[in-house]
């Protein structure tokens, strides 16, 4: 019998006795690459999976079983406002032409609501995306913009929660607890961001953003109204993980947290 979500997505290393609870758009590409190395894979060798996400999805099949309480469980989280901008840019702007993209049903529904033809290349604005999100229950959302605390809602307590904002320091703490070395060589491709604010970013369509040389700094996507709406919707993440509505986070040391 398959475990229900979110436990069904957890990655378990029985040799090192730990479980990783992946959350999309929270350095999950880097962390999944790191997880592969703990299974004995080495980057650059012929056995390195070309697509870690797909490989580990298949690897999970048939591996469902109870996780011993003695295993160390961990997850990483990210400021929910930054995570939402990152998800929008990656799924709606950069990879808009991927047929199975989770952005496509959102674009269709928004276009239908606005009574306009569906145009995946032109896409929708960040403001329209936010309106779509807050009109739905959290568990109805795609995992790339589902609130992060829901990923840790399993019967087993999560022992270690790190933050993307202090990624290397937290990974060093984690790997020391696991008794293994930490390599800083795994990183996902970074989106090209400008360091300057840009007016009008919340209402630019994906097509318009795609034509820029660099994306506006993430804070450009929030006016006061959007910041308030998004912060309210993701308030459980803020409370759980110590983030605040202005996009900063509290002084943080990777902590032992209980679900």
Image: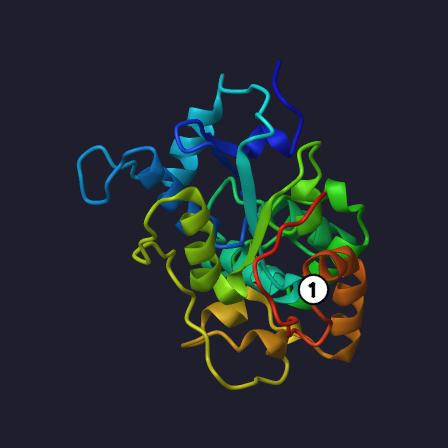
Q: Which residue is labeled 1 in the image?
A: 242
Whole-percent x, y for residue 103 in the image: 59, 49
Point 53% across, 45% down: residue:
101
User: In the image, is residue 251 above or below residue 67?
Assistant: below
Q: Looking at the picture, how far across and down is residue 4, in whole percent?
A: 67, 26
- Is residue 21 visible to us here? no
Q: Residue at x 74, y 41 (%)?
A: 140
Q: Is residue 105 above or below residue 217?
A: above
Graded by Cα atoms within 10 Å as few (under 14), some (14 to 19) or many (20 or more), the crowding at tag 1 reads some
Occupied quadrant, residue 212: bottom left
Q: Nearer the viewer, residue 9 or 166?
A: 166
Query: What is the quadrant of the N terminus in the image?
Result: top right
Quadrant housing the C terminus: top right
Front one among 81 and 165: 165
Q: Which of the pair 177/161 is nearer the observer? A: 177
| 198 sits to left or right of 215 | right
């Amino acid at each position: 019998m398959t475990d229900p979500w979110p436990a069904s997505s957890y990655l378990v290393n029985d040799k090192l006795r730990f479980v990783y609870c992946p959350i999309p758009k929270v350095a999950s590409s880097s962390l999944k690459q790191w997880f592969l190395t703990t299974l004995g894979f080495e980057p650059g060798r012929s056995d390195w999976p070309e697509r870690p996400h797909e490989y580990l999805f298949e690897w999970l099949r048939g591996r469902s079983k109870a996780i011993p309480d003695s295993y160390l469980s961990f997850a990483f989280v990210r400021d929910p406002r930054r995570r939402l901008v990152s998800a929008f840019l990656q799924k709606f702007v950069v990879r808009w032409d991927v047929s199975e993209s989770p952005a496509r049903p959102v674009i269709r529904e928004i276009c239908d609501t606005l009574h306009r033809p569906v145009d995946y290349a032109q896409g929708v604005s960040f403001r329209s995306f936010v309106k779509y999100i807050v009109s739905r229950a959290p568990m109805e959302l795609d995992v790339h913009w589902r609130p992060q605390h829901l990923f840790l809602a399993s019967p087993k307590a999560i022992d270690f929660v790190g933050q993307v904002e202090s990624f290397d320091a937290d990974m060093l703490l984690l790997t020391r607890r696991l008794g293994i070395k930490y390599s800083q060589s795994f990183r996902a491709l970074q989106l090209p961001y400008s360091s300057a604010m840009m007016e009008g970013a919340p209402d630019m369509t994906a097509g318009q953003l795609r034509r820029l040389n660099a994306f506006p700094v993430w804070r450009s996507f929030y006016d006061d109204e959007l910041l308030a709406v998004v912060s309210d919707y993701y308030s459980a993440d803020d409370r759980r993980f110590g983030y605040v509505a202005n996009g900063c986070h509290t002084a943080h040391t990777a902590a032992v947290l209980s679900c």
